[in-house]
Amino acid sequence: MRQSSQCAVVVVNVCLCFGTAVPNALADETCNSPYISNLIKGQEDFVHVWTLGVEGLGDGSDKLVTVDANPASKTYGRVVDSLSVGGRGEAHHMGFTDDRKFLWAGGLDDSKIHVFDVGTNPSKPKLIRTITDLPAKTKFVGPHTFYALPGRMLIGNLSNTADKGGVTGMALYNNKGTLVARYDMPSVSLGGVKGDGYGYDIAINPAKNVLLTSSFAGWQNYMRELGDLIKDAEAMKHFGNTMVVWNLKSMRPTQVLSVPGAPLEIRWSLAPGQNWAITAAALTAKLWLIKQAEGGAWSAREVGTIGNPAQVPLPVDISITAAGKGLWVNTFMDGTTHYFDLTDPEHPKETYQRRIGTQVNMISQSWDGKRVYMTSSLLAHWDKKGADNEQFLRAFNWDGHALTPAFEVDFTKEKLGRPHHMKFTARANQSRTLAALAR
């Protein structure tokens, strides 16, 4: 009941801020935009996996793979649908529209954006639109983060058409796929720190009227073989070292924060009154806390270490718990997941870790925190080779102390490709049934 109450406060604050209707369900997995309605309160039915095509494996195309995730189903833990998009564009991330009926999924190489209908029949998504005008209309390439706003989709990009370096910006589309606006990442000094113009993730705190962005690298880096990239001293200089604080209503940057080492995913605490966010820096294996000072300015401070930085664990995806008391961090190179106690966010403590495979990247958890899903692929040219190139979706149950395997899908054996980002859906009657049970 405590988690549901906390979520209710967050959702109400979001809706009051933007004048939108309060959704009739209260909770969901913890890493979505706060503007998404029709949220899953309990058991998810399906996990949708945006998957990179591999030449010579199946049809070789990028695809949206749907896996049954409901233990009560006869097809639990099995692939129930696979929808190809007819090419390989380096499938990477995706995000729901605010009504949760559609998934927008992007390619980091071809910059195409595919829109899937997952609301009509979540067990069998349909490709309804492909948006191809991002480079021509914005001069940005590499659509990475898809973040729902009321009636619109804000897209964080990684690169540009001019030199395919890391200087980039955000693009705003309406839900019908028409470009509304573009916003350049700052390359000037704001708050005493010079912007590098790089982009990666987006995260919003409506109560504070703040949007945060993080930074990674451009097409010239992320489309190279990782081994070659690491040996190139000049190329290794071209990774982001900043985060940007934006005024959400005006969409203007107000501060640049120094966060060395390519800060990636950003997670705001979802607990009421806890107006802080956390990120992991990939190249330095550090956790950073972003918090507002009494004077109103925001600051970023290193608060923890992930694994052994000397061994370059390469922290990638993170997932915060609904109560803001815990954080999952996956480290790609050693295939390990780490759980940090965030009771005191100024001093995170690692309390659990488990090796998931030879490599591990993305992590998603249910709102109640009892189910955790992980996938293996980072980037086509960064994944490991030979026997270490495991490609999987692995599901676990979490009791607060240890992970217990639930099911696994071997994407290579199934000839599907390299699984990357995940999103959950539920059947149409799921939220109503759960609401009745809650009463």
Image: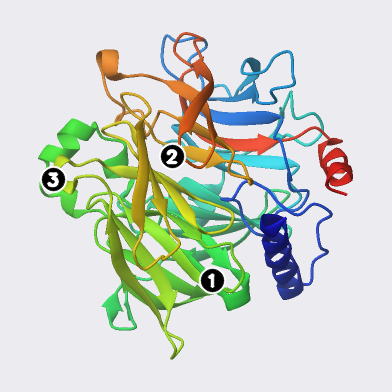
Give coordinates of residue 20: x percent, y percent.
Answer: 79, 66
Q: CA distance from mark 3 to mark 1?
A: 33 Å
Q: Residues within 10 Å of mark 1 (few under 14, many from 20)?
A: few
Q: Is residue 107 above or below residue 321?
A: above
339 and 139: which is toward the camera? 339
Q: CA distance from mark 2 to mark 1?
A: 34 Å
Q: Is residue 54 above or below residue 306?
A: above
Give coordinates of residue 395: x percent, y percent.
Answer: 53, 27
Give coordinates of residue 11: x percent, y percent.
Answer: 72, 63
Numbered label attached to residue 310: 3
Query: At label 1, which amino acid type do we have?
Result: Gln
Q: Residue at x 63, y 46 (%)?
A: 367
Q: Residue at x 24, y 40 (%)?
A: 313
Tell me which corner region of the image, top left, top right, bottom left or bottom right, holds residue 317.
Answer: top left
Q: Residues within 10 Å of mark 2 (few under 14, many from 20)?
A: many
Q: Are marks 2 and 3 in contact (CB under 8 Å)?
A: no
2 vs 3, front mark: 3
Query: At label 2, which amino acid type do we have?
Result: Leu
Q: Is residue 351 above or below residue 67?
A: below
Q: Residue at x 71, y 71 (%)?
A: 13
The local secondary structure at tag 1 comes to: loop
Q: Which quadrant, please, contains the N terminus?
A: bottom right
368 and 331: which is toward the camera? 368
Residue that mark 1 sits on: 274
